[in-house]
Amino acid sequence: MYVAVKGGERAIDNAHAWLATERRGDTAIPELSVAQIRSQMTLAVNRVMAEGSLYDPDLAALAIKQSRGDLIEAVFLIRAYRTTLPRLAASRPLDTGSMAVDRRISATFKDLPGGQVLGPTFDYTHRLLDFALMAEASPDATSGVLPTPVPSPQGAEKGPGSDAGTIAGAAAPPSPVVGEGWGGGAPARVPHVTSFLNRDGLIESTSALEAAPSDLTREPMELPASRALRLQAITRGDEGFVLGLAYSTQRGYGRTHAFVGELRIGRVAVEVEIPELGFAVEIGEVELTECETVNQFKGSRTEPPQFTRGYGLVFGQSERKAISMSLVDRALRWQELGEDNIGAPAQDEEFVLMHCDNIQASGFLEHIKLPHYVDFQAEMELVRRLRAEALAMQEAAE
């Protein structure tokens, strides 16, 4: 049981003041602004938004600053703030096929329609520390100029082997204009790679949901969960936990050998239906990472041999999380596809869904810091009694 501690208000106030001092750091060094965090630590901002279930880069950057860079604490702050916000409307389902793509790659088709776009990625860096970054930046410190993007001809049909959307040199920042590609104007619709397999009937077909899925942010998790609910839980689950589960499926704990059919990163318009107007209104855009994996499937008692899908969708640029999510999603579908459960952790729905949330996990873990004086006294008395009984039995045996 817990014991209330009284008389500690002054100590708590002092702890808060000390925390603020530690957060500020050396006052001789300029303080980090929220704008700097948002602009220069975008991957951390993206993770906080994804796991906090709230798309707001400014608030995510503020939470990172307030938490001294502890991303789980920042996620906690975002989720707590999110609960205070009213639900004014629900957006229409996002159409990722109309995404203004900044990065698009496929491990299954080299010359895919629409072309492969490397975009901003660490994939081809040498993973060596760049000590030049330690130098203080100045307006004229950059060497060279940004590479010039090669825009796609507007309205041109992109076929296999097309170099449309590729970049001369390195990738340039995406256009800040909503709905525009690097060349300006409305971007051509980029088809999903899995749609090519679907034409030949080589991959399982998908169907639209007949009813709106449950909202995990407003309703408690219930097992067994639908695939839509599982995806909601995993997309806001802890990246490290989901990554570990995904890695386990690749090492044999799940019998899934996946190919990245397509990984795309870009911006998608958000539309809201206005009943009074009778049509949808675009209210902004969000940056998303989408991943579809393709898995070989030998067939089962209920399904024919074909390729099956795994799906991942995450706020911001977070391809490691999106790929991991798609692998875990596919592993959890063993029952739906008539596969055998080999006892892999990634196949256990309850294990995955009840342990992927880092806020629940950290809360339960850190509660053992609270005073447990009565519990400990009881256990100490028990240990003393057991020791006395063991000593008495030992003396009797002698």
Image: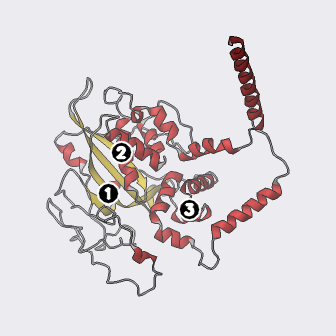
- Pick the residue in front: 72 or 159: 72
For label 3, the residue is 69
**Camera-side mark, 2 or 3:** 3
Report whether 69 appears left or right of 133. Answer: right
The residue lying at 77 percent from left, 38 percent from top is: 373
| Secondary structure beneath label 1 | strand
For label 1, the residue is 264
Residue 72 image position (x, y, % from top left): 55, 53
The residue lying at 48 percent from left, 61 percent from top is: 44
Its colouring scheme is secondary structure
| Secondary structure beneath label 2 | helix
- Pick the residue in front: 373 or 238: 373
Q: Is residue 168 above or below residue 240?
A: below
Instruction: Check disc 2 and give the amino acid type.
Output: Ser
Q: Tell me, for residue 326, which label it has, or none.
A: 2
Report whether 394 appears left or right of 287. Answer: right
Instruction: Check disc 1 and give the amino acid type.
Output: Arg
Residue 168 found in image quarter: bottom left
- Quadrant containing the N terminus is top right
Instruction: Check disc 3 and give the amino acid type.
Output: Gly
**Camera-side mark, 3 or 1:** 3
- Sequence-wise first label, 2 or 3: 3
- Pick the residue in front: 35 or 192: 35
The residue lying at 16 percent from left, 42 percent from top is: 200
CA–CA distance between discs 2 and 1?
13 Å
Residue 337 image position (x, y, % from top left): 31, 30
